[in-house]
Image (spheres, grey):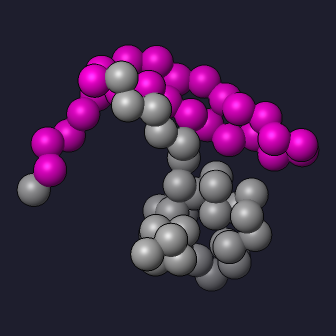
Amino acid sequence: MAEKRQISHEGEITLGNVVIPCYVLEDGTRVLSGNAMQSALKLQEESDSKSGTRLARYMN
């Protein structure tokens, strides 16, 4: 199991009309919310879970 990294900073990035939460982890890694990215890319339907897993499956 991967070690859970802590968030050191959080904020938002606005792309057009979409606001996507973003984070910087304690090791300097920058990440975007998977769920918000799914929504921004129109990969999310109302029946989908909120976890962002659909985007990960699509990217794979």
Q: Quadrant of the C terminus?
A: bottom left
- Check the image and report above or below for 33 versus 35: above
The extreme bottom residue here reads 47
- Check the image and report above or below for 30 versus 1: above
Q: Is residue 25 left or right of residue 10?
A: left
Q: Quadrant of the N terminus?
A: bottom left
Residue 36 in view, yes or no? yes
Residue beneath the point at 71% across and 32% down: 13
- Check the image and report above or below for 24 versus 41: above
Residue beneath the point at 50% across and 71% down: 59
Q: Is residue 39 left or right of residue 24?
A: right
Q: Is residue 17 magenta?
A: yes
> Quadrant of the rendered structure where residue 29 is?
top left
> Quadrant of the rendered structure where residue 50 is?
bottom right
Most prominent secondary structure in the magenta stretch? strand
Q: Position of residue 39 (x, y in %)?
A: 70, 61
- The boundaries of the magenta stretch are 2-27
Residue beneath the point at 54% across and 42% down: 32
The extreme right residue here reads 17
Q: Position of residue 17 (x, y in %)?
A: 89, 44
The extreme left residue here reads 1
Residue 7 in view, yes or no? no
Residue beneath the point at 79% across and 35% down: 14
How many discs appear? 0
Q: Position of residue 25 (x, y in %)?
A: 36, 27
Q: Is residue 20 left or right of residue 7?
A: right
